Image: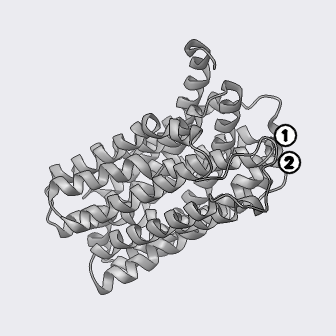
Amino acid sequence: MPRPHALAPPMRQAARLALGTASALGLARFAYGLLLPAMRDDLHWSLAEAGAMNTANGLGYLLGAAATAVVARRRGTAATFRWGMVLVALALAATAVTDDYLVLLAVRAAAGAAGAAVFIAGGVIASRIAARAASGAPITVYFAGAGLGIAAGGAAIPPVADHWRLAWAGLGLAAAVAALVSWTAANTGPEEHAAAAGRARLRPLWGIALAYLLFAAGYITYITFLSAYLADQRAPLGQVVLTWTALGLAVVAAPVLWSGPTARWPGTRALTALLAVLAGGAALALAVPAPAVILASAIVYGATFMGVPAAVTTLIKAHTPPAGWTATLSAFTILFAAGQTAGPWLAGLLADRTSTDAALAWTAILCGAAAMIAAFAGRPRRDAAPRPGAIRTNA
């Protein structure tokens, strides 16, 4: 086990790299939920139209995920991360300059495509940092960066949410600063091109892939419609700020809770636990829609949802050789993007015909189903002998 001081440089690098998920996820994807009510009122959208904005973001994410392995192979993982960060900042700033629905859809798609490049390339770099440090902590720190973006947005956006153009411009500026600070953290070392050249390995992980698809379709609706749900509950500004900030800080704290289980628990046990707790957290706000319970629901959600990609990345890292990490993570991100592309639009259609409660129920049901699939995928198979170096599959 490395001494604590030996882990310091890798953890510092992972912390700066985490500005990638802060920007690509916390700002470019999740902050939209804070601005949805004001944009919906100002631009006269239905919930389905509002949800389609995140569907466009998810579609862009899907296209970006499909292209990232090719781009990383040609340009390198570090360059893919860095220029993805720049494009995220430009797309966020561009959202402030128009109210045309089709243009906004295109800009949201561009933000999604750039975000996918950042997410995948950063995940590969974080995996490499973790391998050098002999610790899973850099991976969970990297994914926890999304919470920094959520917490910053939760504290800063609601007071100016009615001026949504100004808010988007501010998000673009924040993403530009994140790109600058994280630039040198993307250094990958001499392994970069070898790691970008492998093939995706999906067969050993098919059950995990299906669970990840359901998770992607489910988790995104909670955070997309959380502000709309709070508005329907006539929540005051202070409650909105507190709920979002607490959610983001819970994401930041998630590595403390889940680094150990993700690294030590055998097979899919950590993934199953994360999905089950996430489903319960979403259901909590529906069971008792009181301010304190909604706050607790947001904290549970925040403390678990970014742990799922971290757990899946750890499983990919265990089941595939380093040369296949980029391609396999890209393939999983394509599945993830497909799920989160369909999720907000379908949940928005359902909510238009019922209420915003349906969005939270959607998250609870799909994540609960994903937990059951992950648990089944982790059961030992009698006909399969474990291969050397493979992660155990007994749940």
Q: In the rendered view, would you say 135 is above or below 313?
A: above
Residue located farthest toward the bottom when viewing the structure as drawn:
353
Q: Amino acid at mark 2?
A: Ala
Q: Which mark is residue 197?
A: 2
Q: Secondary structure at mark 1?
A: helix
Q: Nearer the viewer, residue 50 or 125?
A: 125
- Which residue position holds label 1? 193
Q: Residues within 10 Å of mark 1 (few under 14, many from 20)?
A: some
Image position, residue 313 (x, y; %): 63, 48
Q: Which mark is residue 374?
A: none
Q: How is the image coloured?
A: one colour
Image position, residue 194 (x, y; %): 86, 40
Which residue is at a point 83% across and 29% down the rendered structure image?
190
* Residue 9 in which image quadrant: top right
Q: Are marks 1 and 2 in contact (CB under 8 Å)?
A: yes
Q: Secondary structure at mark 2?
A: loop
Q: In the rendered view, would you say 369 is above or below 94?
A: below
Question: Which quadrant: the N terminus?
Answer: top right
* Residue 331 in which image quadrant: bottom right
Q: Is residue 156 left or right of residue 103?
A: left
Q: In the rendered view, would you say 198 is above or below 46?
A: above
Which residue is at a point 56% across and 67% down the rendered structure image?
373
